[in-house]
Amino acid sequence: MSDDKLRPRVVWILANTTWSIYNFRRRLILALREAGYDVVICSPPDDYVGRIEALGVRHVPLHMRNSSIGPMRELVTLVRLIALIWRERPTALLSFTPKVNMYAGIAARLTGIPILMNISGLGRGFSSGPTLRRISEGLYRLAARRAHRMLFQNEDDRAYFIDKGITEAVRTERLPGSGVDLERFTPTPRPPASSLRFLMATRLLRDKGVVEFVSAASVLAPRYSLARFRLVGFLGIGDPNAVTANELSRWQAEGLIEYGGPTDRIEDELAQADCLVLPSYYREGVPRILLEAAASGLPIITTDFTGCRDAVEAGVTGLLCPPRDVAALTDAMARIIQMDGEERRAMGAAGRRKVEQEFDERIVIGRYLDLLSDIMTASASNRSPVPSPPERAGPLTANPSRAASSKDSRNHS
């Protein structure tokens, strides 16, 4: 038997925080281990390294600053990652988040390691002006050249990459977001109450629509005494686009919002909410929180914007409003308040049906397993893996036999 056939099947998962891998990719990790892969997590160290290692996988530090754009610092980060992957020689890479996608893709190209690249939105690099956009396009073009597959969460981003010549259509595929755990997120009976709670759960960044949410709350609170407005999520400390701690304190002091901080139990927050609001104009993939809210039987208000609109059937499972439009957002929230409980429940039930049909997490995990199987087969026969198309175009169908069966938890973004 050749040395290649004896070599362990090692899959690296790379992202910009260990927290996000633990909360968003935990079931994928368990599914990979169940399928016989050795899994290594490569990410900047944080408080979640111990939890990752408790899953039975190894953590390798990725020394990277998410908000840095200094050329020399970024070059050092890239060179270190290339050297690390060259030394370790994993069988395949799975990358997430924009900067990590770029650097891991370049490293994969130089080392000959197959990579599956998840494009979960384009991020600020494509919306911060022409210079940074051209740099981002150039880096992605280098990274995508040898990618086994680029997995997009919405059709807008996929079309953009193809139209700009960043990648070939044959190397692209659309997945239904990151999927949602339909066992963890389930509808909770909501008895009649004296208040109606709007929940916004996200990183507290301006382009996630936090200021617009608070502005709408300031208009609605005097009109509707039953309305409550709750924010949950990390303060984006160190991010120039983040809401400041002083702003947050002022909003709380003025009685506009409740702030619940970050949480690993977002399902508990959703169980206490009546409507999920995400007025984002960030270049999202498909925001996971929208899928989790719909799976929990909540009506949704979000923007008619890339990624966000994919999670909502307007007027059926939720309401859409233009980005950066406080008046339209206020009107949409007022419409939810004016609905009776049965109307809100019907909208939430329609959302649950939508995610059951289109966004089951097992669809996504099953497709990763299929693509990794292609890579491993090619590796065992000493040939380069050739991208193979999915079984059919359009939404994939869940294949529970190829997906994780473990019951575990994640978090929101």
Image (spheres, rainbow, N blue to C red):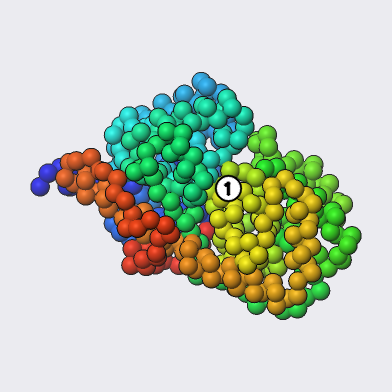
From this viewpoint, which residue is outermost toward the front?
163
Q: Secondary structure at mark 1?
A: loop
- Residue 36 visible (yes or no): yes
Residue pointed to by mark 1? 306
**Residue 101 position by quadrant:** top left
Between 154 and 267, the one nearer to me in the picture:
154
Residue 38 can be seen, yes or no: no
Q: Residue 215, percent across and down? A: 80, 50
Q: Closest to the observer: 389 or 34?
A: 389
Q: Position of residue 133 (x, y in %)?
A: 55, 30
Residue at 48% in and 67% down: 357
Residue 27 picture location, percent across and down: 44, 59
State left or right for residue 411 relative to residue 214. left
- Residue 272 vs 289, above or below: the answer is below
Horizontal arrangement in the rendering, residue 38 relative to residue 257 (left or right):
left
Image position of 352 with respect to 386: above or below: below
Characterize the local packing of mark 1: few (<14), some (14-19) or many (20 or more) Cα atoms within 10 angstroms. Answer: many
Residue furthest top as drawn: 72
Provide residue 405's location: percent of width, then percent of height.
39, 67
What amino acid is labelled 1 in the image? Thr
Left or right position of 172 against 349: left
